[in-house]
Amino acid sequence: MIALRPYATLAGRDAGWLKARLHFRFAGMGKLEYGPVGPLHVWNDDEFAPDSGFPMHAHRDVEIITYVRRGAVTHADSLHNQSRVVAGDVQVMSAGDGIVHAEHNNETEPTLVYQIWLKPRETGGTPSWQTRRFPQADRSGKLTVLASGYADDQQQHGALPLKADARLLVAKLRAGDRITHTMNGDAYLVAVDGRLQLNGTELAVRDGAAIIGETQMALHALEDTEVVMIEAPRKTA
């Protein structure tokens, strides 16, 4: 089943400095049917105005992936980490038993990010934070694992570690590209900046789709586009 979540149907808010659309129902906002996919329960499409951002605030018992689509995010946290994460790069924060952090757009142009939250395998534990620059060429015409809760992905692909049963995959497709992927569970996918077909279902720019119970995924790029996907083990009865 491909359950389309068109961008126009997503709940959102406009705080002036922050414009957000929510792919998943969160904090009472969004459609009831836009529920979690495995451990994935938040996927926000955020736009930060220049010289703005979230001040220091706390999290616990959540895995947070920040994927920068345009611009850059400057991160600081209570573990004394500081970094500027640029477009195409990823940061993973494991909140564990508690972490305080801030994220700002210190650039002169708007910054676009995906904020993705996953439930960890276990609650508590030591918080951590990592970021990594991944070569753009590695994701050209194919899905590449950038973050994962599985040791094989971390060792073979250099994926950032997650403390959740999930993987972050990204592809850069040119118009006309076709790729197939054998599903290792259910997934949620977003067409970042161009139209594509997912198992025959068309997604417009910034549309999302839950992929439930499929064994194969076929992507056909109708326009140049980036694809971002979280894949997680399928629930068993």
Image (cartoon, rainbow, N blue to C red):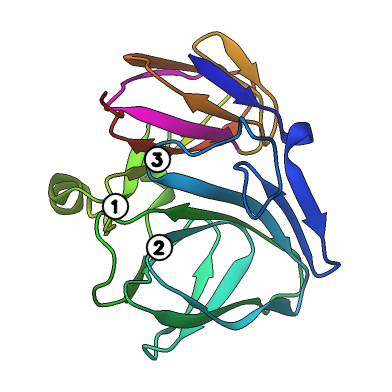
Q: Number of labelled discs?
A: 3
Q: Kindly report the distance in space between the C-alpha atoms of the residues bearing marks 1 and 3.
A: 23 Å
Query: Which quarter of the figure has residue 64?
Result: bottom left
Q: Residue at x 31, y 44 (%)?
A: 166
Which residue is label 1 attached to?
Answer: 164
Mark 2, secondary structure of its residue = loop
Q: Amino acid at mark 1?
A: Ala
Q: Earlier in the sequence, mark 1 or mark 3?
A: 3
* In-image side of 185 versus 62 (left or right): left
Q: Secondary structure at mark 1?
A: loop
Where is residue 122, by image quadrant?
bottom left
Q: Is residue 65 above or below residue 11?
A: below
Q: CA distance from mark 2 to mark 1?
A: 9 Å
Say left or right for 149 vs 187: left
Residue 32 or 196: which is nearer the viewer?
32
In space, the residues marked 2 and 3 are separated at their CA atoms by 27 Å
Look at the image and tell me whether residue 141 can be seen.
Answer: no
Please state which amino acid type lies under the numbered disc 3: Arg
User: Disc 2, disc 3: CB below 8 Å?
Assistant: no
